[in-house]
Image (tube, helix red, strand yellow):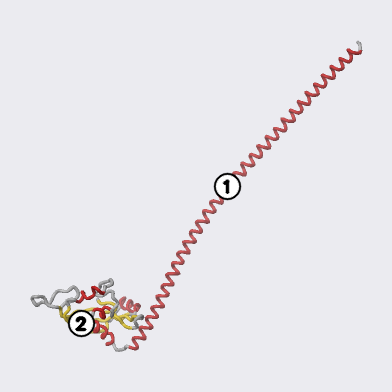
Amino acid sequence: MDLLEVFMKKAAVITVSAILFVVLLAVNYLLWDNSTKQESIKELESKEETKQESLEQVLNDYWNEKNLNTDLQQQITDLQNTIIEKDSEITKLTTEKMDIWAMVGDKNNIISQLKKNTDPSIYRAIVEDWVDNIINNDYFMAYSSHNEKDIFNNRADILFTRYGEKFMNIEFMEVTEFKVRLLEGEDALDQAARNRIVFDVLLNVELIKDTEGYPVSDAIFKNGINHFKITMAFDQSRGQWIIWTIE
């Protein structure tokens, strides 16, 4: 065998060996790359599971916070309603307290006035002045001498412009009897609470005559003796007693 032939055989062996070496390297690289990709896939799957768990936890936290917020809002609403109720109770109690103070003040004034006016004729004089003003058609003075309400159970304000209509059929009127009305039970308690004095009053009334000479019919008065319950009250703003109601 000559030298060239030996060289060619060696070259072929080296070439085959190189090719096998390259193939082995490629196979190892592919195996390594596949292993790396598998690990990457597992890592991504692990991360995905972690993200899913984190998302579920976030959602759970969100709904828990939302439910807690709803509960807190309801508590706030309940507390606000409680505050409103307490404010209403405080306002009511304050009003009642002021009413009590006013009542005490009224009673003090009433007591003071009663001490000054032990003679009941002072109250009769007020009613008699009212009667005289009616007879003399001085309705302004008559109108200003009482409370303007509950006159003859009217239960509403009587306008001055129509005040005289109440007495248009009266020819003559006088007080024939005037005495303090004795009250019992609830009436007495109500009377004491309101600081009023009630009188039984008899008025002798003469109504005008019709064309045949008979007394006309009237919605309030009758011809002859009329009985009325007149309540007197002390008006602090005027500093005097007034007619509170006539019924």
Asked whether, in this view, residue 101 is left or right of residue 67, the answer is left
Vertical placement of 103 versus 2: above or below? below
Q: Position of residue 182 (x, y in %)?
A: 28, 81
Farthest top residue in view: 1
How many residues crowd mark 1 within 10 Å: few (<14), some (14–19), many (20+)?
few
State left or right for residue 216 relative to residue 13. Answer: left
Give the camera-side residue of 171 and 125.
Answer: 171
Decide which of 143, 50 is in the foreground and name it: 143
Q: Is residue 229 visible?
A: no
Question: Picture coordinates of residue 49 (x, y %)?
Answer: 63, 40
Cα separation between marks 2 and 1 = 91 Å
The residue lying at 50 percent from left, 56 percent from top is: 74
Which picture quadrant has residue 199? bottom left
Q: Residue at x 57, y 47 (%)?
A: 60
Q: Residues within 10 Å of mark 2 (few under 14, many from 20)?
A: few
Query: Mark 1 belongs to which amino acid?
Result: Asn
Assign the N terminus to one quadrant of the image: top right
According to the picture, the residue beneath numbered tag 1 turns out to be 60
Q: Position of residue 246 (x, y in %)?
A: 25, 77
Residue with the mark numbered 2? 136
Q: Amino acid at mark 2?
A: Asn
- Does the image show residue 89? yes
Up-down relation of residue 164 to residue 116 (above or below): above
| Residue 235 left/right relative to 217 | right
Kindly identify which numbered label has been placed on residue 11: none
Residue 53, placed above or below residue 173: above
Q: Secondary structure at mark 1?
A: helix
Where residue 142 appears, x then y in whole percent?
Answer: 25, 80
For the point 41% across and 72% down, the residue is: 95
Front in this rendered view, residue 32 or 163: 163
Disc 2 is placed on an element classified as: loop
Q: Earlier in the sequence, mark 2 or mark 1?
A: 1
